[in-house]
Image (cartoon, coloured by chain):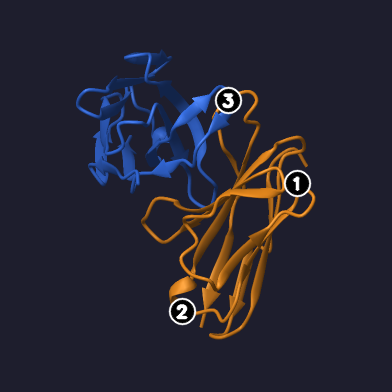
Chain colours: A blue, B orange
Amino acid sequence: GENVEQHPSTLSVQEGDSAVIKCTYSDSASNYFPWYKQELGKGPQLIIDIRSNVGEKKDQRIAVTLNKTAKHFSLHITETQPEDSAVYFCAASIGRSRTSYDKVIFGPGTSLSVIP
Amino acid sequence: GAGVSQTPSNKVTEKGKYVELRCDPISGHTALYWYRQSLGQGPEFLIYFQGTGAADDSGLPNDRFFAVRPEGSVSTLKIQRTERGDSAVYLCASSNRGRSGELFFGEGSRLTVL
């Protein structure tokens, strides 16, 4: 089955700097890659996702890149702010159509601290 | 409410007891997922429902764990003969698979087995 690895496990950056989190996946059939942010005591919340027919996607200060050949994908956060401090999870899934997805498998998480 | 609701938010039980955790998904969401999250770990997949049926239960760790969704809405995760290793936060998520792959999570039920 699918296995998602993620690093680093912890990341500390100065406010205004960039943060990069990297993930790898094992199942070449995976074609949907979401990123979730989890704040203390809350459930994870989707922040951005990418599908395998796209190499890069950007939403304001957040961007994701995907290298299907290498089975790597990354999250980039620019101009970090203290409210970006949280745990970030990458994940992978197989989308068989727009209306049908297999289970979503999560990585172990990266705890990001943004120092004011 | 508008979001996924999970009850109880906290449950403390003794080893060997039976526990039920309830999930009320977002209205109209056809897919419902259960995950288990231990401290410092990512959510671990347990089971997901498409409608009333379990589409994939490959993540259930053993036969002490069982989940139902009899009317295609509310779901209950049932754990028999609880063990200390079952202590974790149990997360429920729902999804409108007709629109996107996004999972909407509840805040979880924290289970502590003494």
Report the chain holding disc 1.
B
Question: Real-space Cα distance between discs 2 and 1?
Answer: 31 Å
Quarter of the image containing the N terminus of chain B?
top right
Residue B49 vertical placement versus B60 (above, below):
above
| Disc ID at residue B72 | 1
Q: Mark 3 = which residue?
A: B100
* Quadrant of the rendered image containing residue A54: top left
The residue mark sitting in front, 2 or 1, is 1
Q: Report helix, strand or loop for mark 2.
A: helix
Q: Residue at point 47% right, 56% down?
A: B59
- Counting residues from the N terminus, which is met first, the one under dot 2 or under dot 1? 1
Say yes or no: labels 2 and 1 on the same chain: yes
* Local crowd size for mark 2, using a 10 Å CA cut-off: few (<14), some (14–19), many (≥20): some
Left/right of residue B31 with respect to residue A90 in the rendered view: right
Q: Is A37 displayed left or right of B3 in the figure? A: left
Q: Which numbered circle lies on residue B113?
A: none
Q: State if disc 2 and disc 3 touch (CB < 8 Å).
A: no
